[in-house]
Image (cartoon, helix red, strand yellow):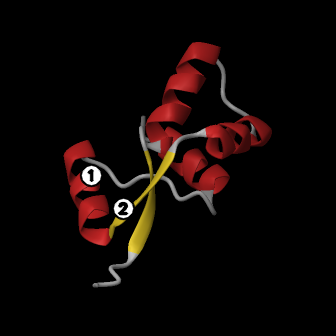
Amino acid sequence: MSKENLITVYNPSLAALLLASETEKRAPLDEKEVNAIRDSATVLRVPEATALEMEQKRGHKDISSENAWAEWQELRKKV
């Protein structure tokens, strides 16, 4: 049995969840809110190839859970 590297991915993407939450709030999310959304989001453990395929279908690289706040601050400047 092959031991393929499993990757954790958010479904839907963490970036999409944060954007939707900020749009609904009509104000910037604070760090506590970003972390709460991250911590309650649905995650999947998928093979690396599947994770890459999901990223390609989404059309963007998702935010990492370890750096959610900092990466969200950068991403929100672009949207």
Q: Which of these two is toward me, 32 or 48?
A: 48
Left or right: 10, with 59 as reference point: right
Q: Which of these two is toward me, 22 or 13?
A: 13
Note whether 25 is above or below 65 in the view shown: above
x and y, in percent, of residue 50 in the image: 26, 61
x and y, in percent, of residue 47 in the image: 32, 68
Mark 1 or mark 2, whichever is nearer to me: 2
Q: CA distance from mark 1 to mark 2?
A: 10 Å
Q: Residues within 10 Å of mark 1 (few under 14, many from 20)?
A: some
**In the rendered image, is residue 39 in sight?**
yes
Left or right: 60, with 42 as reference point: left
Answer with mark 1 or mark 2, whichever residue precedes in sequence: 2
Q: Are the residues at dot 1 and dot 2 in contact (C-beta closer than 8 Å)? A: yes
Q: Tell me the residue that label 2 is attached to.
A: 46
Left or right: 53, with 34 as reference point: left
Q: Which mark is residue 54?
A: 1
Query: Residue at 60% across / 46% down in the picture?
Result: 73
Query: Residue at 65% across / 39% down in the picture?
Result: 40
